[in-house]
Image (cartoon, rainbow, N blue to C red):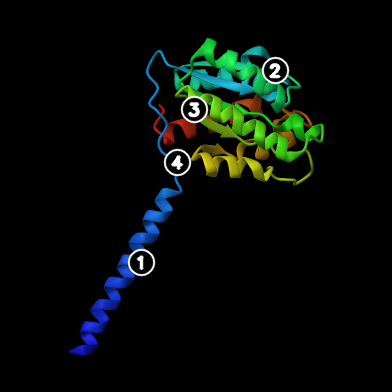
Amino acid sequence: MKSRVQTTALLKCLLLALSLSALAACSDVPPPLPRLGADDVVLAFGDSITYGSGAGPEESYPKVLAQLIGRHVVGAGVPGEITAKGVQRLPGVLDEVQPKILLLCLGGNDMLRKVEPVATESNLRTMVRMARDRGIAVVLIAVPKPALFGGNASFYQAIAREGDLHLESKILKDILYDNEFKADPIHPNAKGYRRMAEAIAELLRKTGAV
């Protein structure tokens, strides 16, 4: 009898531990993105990758994304921009566009110009805060290091984890490590931008935005 009681108690402890583990795992998942209404705007903010360098004007990822999700997507990409310049430019764009969701894709030019990672990370955090202070949800898009098999800079994951943000960390790495989807060493081609748009559209669907 005593053995059965002990076994039951042990099972209860195991079930409790599993439940707590499941709750902890769930807490690592960022909250759903706000649902986009028919008139809501998505802002794609970044550098030449957001601008669409390497493809035609209608082939950039913001243009393709708008078609895929049936919402207005404003592309605000400036070729060559570093995050320090993005910090200066973003407030005016946010106030003008008034988006519901910000797609933030910056940092590649910082790495190309050997900007200290701590400065890049700080600038990205500042831009996230600027958006959130205005009630705008943020999706962070990681840019791979400009090195063969370099992977993504670790600060993207750190910012996403700290800010409870949704992070797209795979698509640009996959595109820029595959010549079929590149116009040059640092820019996608039209096929690459479509793949990028498809990945972001899928993220927006999975997170409840569309």
- Residue type at tag 3: Arg
- Residue type at tag 2: Val
Please, what secondary structure does the residue beneath circle 1 have? Answer: helix
Q: For the C terminus, give its image quadrant.
A: top left
Which mark sits nearer the N-terminus, 1 or 4?
Answer: 1
Tag 3 near tag 2, CB within 8 Å = no
Q: For the N terminus, give its image quadrant.
A: bottom left
In the image, is residue 145 above or below residue 188?
A: below
Q: Which residue is mark 4?
A: 30
The quadrant holding residue 62 is top right
Tag 3 near tag 4, CB within 8 Å = no
* Distance (Cα) linking label 3 and label 1: 35 Å
Which mark sits nearer the N-terminus, 4 or 2?
Answer: 4
Q: From where the camera sits, is residue 145 visible?
A: no
Q: Which residue is mark 3?
A: 132
Residue 24 lies, in percent from the top left, at: 41, 55
Mark 3, mark 4: which one is toward the viewer?
Answer: 3
Residue 56 lies, in percent from the top left, at: 68, 15
* Distance (Cα) linking label 4 and label 2: 29 Å
Please, what secondary structure does the residue beneath circle 3 have? Answer: helix
Observer-nearest of 195 and 186:
186
Q: From where the camera sits, is residue 119 visible?
A: yes
Please, what secondary structure does the residue beneath circle 2 have? Answer: loop
Within 10 Å of disc 1 (Cα), the crowding (few <14, some 14-19, many 20+) is few
Q: Which residue is mark 2?
A: 78
* Distance (Cα) linking label 1 and label 4: 23 Å
Mark 3, mark 2: which one is toward the viewer?
Answer: 3
Which mark sits nearer the N-terminus, 3 or 4?
Answer: 4
Residue 205 lies, in percent from the top left, at: 43, 32
Within 10 Å of disc 2 (Cα), the crowding (few <14, some 14-19, many 20+) is some
Mark 3, mark 1: which one is toward the viewer?
Answer: 3
Q: Which residue is mark 1?
A: 17
